[in-house]
């Protein structure tokens, strides 16, 4: 059994004071102080999906996570990341755009490119296998993490969500607990605890 961890939108726009969408999120400290050291200690890597939310984006007035600016930067250190990083421009990871992630060129309108996202998954994560598990962390549980879980589930991956590694946009603990136990999320993914994930990872490490 292989375990692959994917971080979604753990960018300073959401995670760091001064970001346009910053709220205090308990998962940021957990990832920085617990998950990252564990991955380093055991020579494990994490895949990453981030966002380029510059205008134009039809139906969205927001203009954030701009490449070249602080809000676009990831909270994850480069030494633990699998490459390449996937950059999306809408909540679902299948949405891309011309000049995505390029701070020196004007971005195009968002469009769906499920084939390219699939190619990224196959290269960085691998093809879906019955015993393999995907574990999602990042921001936000009520938006981009959920959309990513749906897309991965559609593609045949067994999706888990690390409870300590995610948070809702508001940062409200009661709201997070409610969503983790809600039918919409449970239809696409299975919440797991850090204790359970460590047990799964220890099995793969020993193999």
Image (cartoon, rainbow, N blue to C red):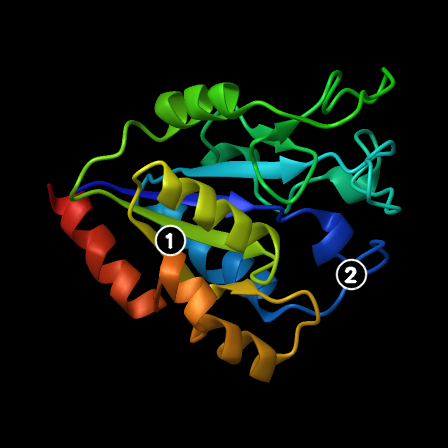
Residue furthest bottom as drawn? 174
* Residue at figure coordinates x 56%, y 32% from the top left: 94
Query: Looking at the picture, how far across and down is residue 41, in whole percent?
Result: 35, 47
Q: Earlier in the sequence, mark 1 or mark 2?
A: 2
Q: Nearer the viewer, residue 37 or 65?
A: 65
The mark tally for this picture is 2
Residue 7, labelled with which disc?
none
Per the image, label 2 sits on a secondary structure element best described as loop
Q: Is residue 81 left or right of residue 192?
A: right
Residue furthest left as drawn? 207
Image quarter of the C terminus: top left
Can I make out residue 157 in this image? Answer: yes
Residue 38, labelled with which disc?
1
Query: Looking at the picture, how far across and down is residue 105, in whole percent?
Result: 85, 15
Q: Is residue 43 above or below residue 19?
A: above
Query: Looking at the picture, how far across and down is residue 144, in whole percent?
Result: 60, 50
Badge 2 density bin: few <14, some 14–19, many ≥20, Cα 10 Å? some
Eye-nearest disc, 1 or 2: 2
Q: Is residue 14 left or right of residue 123?
A: right
Toward which corner of the image does residue 130 lie, by quadrant?
Answer: top left
* Residue at figure coordinates x 51%, y 79% from the top left: 178
Toward which corner of the image does residue 92 lie, by quadrant?
Answer: top right
CA–CA distance in space, label 1 to label 2:
26 Å
Q: Which residue is mark 2?
A: 22
* Residue at figure coordinates x 51%, y 25% from the top left: 114
């Amino acid at each position: 059994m292989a375990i692959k961890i994917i971080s979604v939108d753990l960018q300073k726009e959401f995670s760091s004071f001064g970001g346009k969408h910053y709220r205090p999120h308990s998962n940021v400290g957990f990832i920085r102080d617990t998950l990252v050291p564990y991955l380093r200690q055991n020579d494990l890597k994490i895949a990453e999906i981030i966002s380029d939310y510059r205008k134009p984006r039809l139906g969205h007035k927001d203009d954030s996570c701009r490449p070249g600016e602080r809000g676009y930067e990831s909270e994850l250190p480069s030494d633990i990341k699998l490459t390449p990083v996937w950059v999306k421009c809408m909540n679902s990871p299948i949405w891309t755009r011309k000049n995505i992630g390029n701070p020196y060129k004007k971005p195009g309108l968002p469009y769906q490119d499920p084939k390219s996202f699939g190619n990224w998954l196959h290269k960085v994560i691998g093809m879906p296998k019955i015993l393999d598990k995907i574990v999602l962390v990042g921001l936000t549980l009520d938006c981009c993490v959920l959309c990513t879980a749906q897309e991965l589930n559609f593609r045949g991956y067994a999706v888990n969500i690390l409870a300590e590694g995610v948070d809702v946009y508001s940062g409200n603990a009661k709201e997070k607990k409610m969503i983790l136990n809600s039918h919409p999320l449970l239809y696409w993914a299975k919440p797991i605890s850090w204790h359970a994930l460590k047990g799964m990872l220890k099995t793969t490490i020993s193999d």
